[in-house]
Image (spheres, helix red, strand yellow):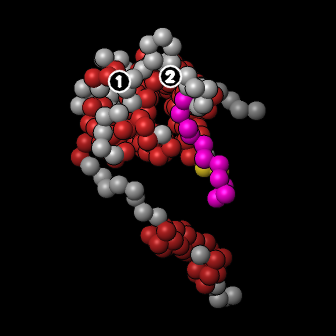
Amino acid sequence: MRALFRSSLDFPRDFPFVRRLAWLPLTCAAALLATGCASTQRAEPYESKEWLQSSTNRIANLALRDNLQSVKRVQLSLYRRNPREWHKWATSAEDATNRTWNAITKEQPLPALQGNTGIDAIRLAFETGAKPYAGDRVAALVVGWASLLKQANGDTWEQTMLDGVNAENSYRAARNFEISLWLISSKPGPDGQPLLLATEISDRGRNLLVDRELSKVVARLDLLAAQADEKYRRAALDFSQNWLLGNLGPFFSMLPKN
């Protein structure tokens, strides 16, 4: 990029200054086009449904997509360290993952959860009292997390201009993910051992995938909550500014300036 700018701006010394200046926009545009085409690619092609989405909807949908991917990574990581969970109802960790997400996308709660979703499913995943939860604790967590993410996204898997992020639900979901992470790392089972193993410490080092991915989810949810709150806070101010400039702007332009 430096070489491109250097060669493009190497004008002869007898060029008039005005002519040099006239070349600058074309030179800069060519440089940006060349570097942009070489290094920038869209992650996804445009789809017709995007015409029904605002830029805010698009950002929320991308955040939801990334959050769901983080949850899937956490699920597989937990299954690798807690194979007894998927053994309760599936033939493999991949089978348990597929069955869990089929239930989520089709909105068919897992039988072991008895219709519980959201925070209630998360509570069941950590239940060790007189009636300990007998189902797959990892799947229960995933169902609960997915429900929280959907609620935070305006209770839809894909927003359009008729939808929006619920700031309060997004903030609460972030806190519930934080609590889930804390419980995973601290909740003991009846035998005094960790209820769910999450962090691997071995000769190869420490594997903190669960902590890292859930922390990413918390950060995205907090950002969406702040953005949604700011959107409504700015709405009244933007309306007032537009009204003021539209109605009184001509009057202000007539006032003498000192």
Sort mark 1 into few (<14), some (14-19) or many (20+) by Cα contacts within 10 Å.
Answer: some
Q: Residue at x 64, y 88 (%)?
A: 12
Q: Nearer the viewer, residue 93 or 108?
A: 93
Q: Do callouts 1 and 2 mark residues in contact (Cβ within 8 Å)?
A: no
Residue 154 coordinates in the image, percent (x, y): 38, 24
Residue on which the image places disc 1:
155
Asked whether the viewer can see residue 234, the reply is no
- The rendered magenta stretch, by its main secondary structure, is classed as loop
Question: Does dot 1 land on a helix, a strand or a loop?
Answer: loop
Asked whether the viewer can see residue 120, the reply is yes
Residue 5 coordinates in the image, percent (x, y): 61, 77
Instruction: Decide: is 205 above or below 57.
Output: below
Residue on which the image places disc 2:
126
Identify the image quadrant of the N terminus: bottom right
Residue span colored magenta: 195-205
Residue 27 coordinates in the image, percent (x, y): 54, 74
Identify the image quadrant of the C terminus: top right
Q: Amino acid at mark 2?
A: Phe
Looking at the image, the residue that sits furthest to the top is: 130
- Residue 73 lies in the magenta-colored region: no
Q: Amino acid at mark 1?
A: Asp
Q: Is residue 14 left or right of residue 111?
A: right
Q: Nearer the viewer, residue 68 or 198?
A: 198
Instruction: Decide: is 83 above or below 88.
Output: below
Sort mark 2 into few (<14), some (14-19) or many (20+) by Cα contacts within 10 Å.
Answer: many
Q: Residue at x 51, y 43 (%)?
A: 81
Task: Name the front one of labels 1 and 2.
Answer: 2
Question: Does dot 2 land on a helix, a strand or a loop?
Answer: loop
Report the number of discs.
2
Mark 1 and mark 2 lie on one chain; the one further toward the N terminus is 2
Looking at the image, the residue that sits furthest to the right is: 258
